[in-house]
Amino acid sequence: MDFALYIRTVGAAVVLSALMDILAPEGSFKKYCRLAWGFVVVAAMLGPLTSGFSYENVEIPDTAAAQAQARARVLTEHKKNLEAITEERFPGCRAYIEVDGEGRVTALTVNGPADANEVMEYAGELNLDMDRVKINEDK
């Protein structure tokens, strides 16, 4: 139901209600007429909520795709945080870290003047195989 039709329907119900109120005879019958026409006006106002709603037009997001996007964002932030922590631990160095789908560190590259033993110790704290660690001191 479009908005213009909704306004016309409610307006017609209100006008008919007022007309019937004027035409109804005085007494207790008028009280019941007002009640009945009040229900008609309320029904006209609630009509779009009850009859015009269809689930066919509701777009339901793909929850699997939304979860995958959220997971990718979380993993990206996790990677950035680990790189920032690594750069704080080794001042003057730039760190590059790779993580798997579970957020575990799979590779570490440190560019800059870092002590190799300290980097290897740090890689052990990250449960990283030593063959997945690179230190480039010339950068």
Image: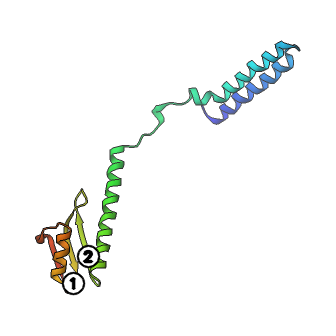
Quadrant of the rendering where the N terminus is positioned: top right
Number of labels in the image equals 2
Which residue, given by chain and number where applicable, does mark 1 sit on? 114
Tag nearer the camera, 2 or 1? 1
Instruction: Give how far across and how far down residue 78 sits, in percent.
Output: 31, 64
Q: Residue at x 20, y 74 (%)?
A: 122
Looking at the image, the residue that sits furthest to the right is 26
Task: Classify 113 as above or below 133.
Answer: below
Callout 1 crowding tier (Cα within 10 Å): few <14, some 14–19, many ≥20: some
Looking at the image, the residue that sits furthest to the left is 131
Which residue, given by chain and number where applicable, does mark 2 sit on? 95
Name which quarter of the figure residue 12 lies in: top right
Task: Classify 84 as above or below 7.
Answer: below
Horizontally, is 2 left or right of 89 in the view? right
Task: Classify 96 as above or below 92.
Answer: above
Task: Classify 102 as above or below 119.
Answer: above
Label 2 element class: strand
Instruction: Give how far across and how far down residue 17 sits, in percent.
Output: 78, 22
Horizontally, is 2 left or right of 76 in the view? right
Instruction: Give how far across and how far down residue 125 sits, in percent.
Output: 20, 70
Q: Residue at x 13, y 68 (%)?
A: 129
Callout 2 crowding tier (Cα within 10 Å): few <14, some 14–19, many ≥20: many
Q: Earlier in the sequence, mark 2 or mark 1?
A: 2
Label 1 element class: loop
Name which quarter of the figure residue 84 lies in: bottom left
Q: Are marks 2 and 1 in contact (CB under 8 Å)?
A: no
Quadrant of the rendering where the C terminus is positioned: bottom left
Name which quarter of the figure residue 133 lies in: bottom left
Mark 1: amino acid: Ala
Q: Residue at x 79, y 26 (%)?
A: 15
Mark 2: amino acid: Ala
Instruction: Give how far across and how far down residue 104 sits, in percent.
Output: 22, 61
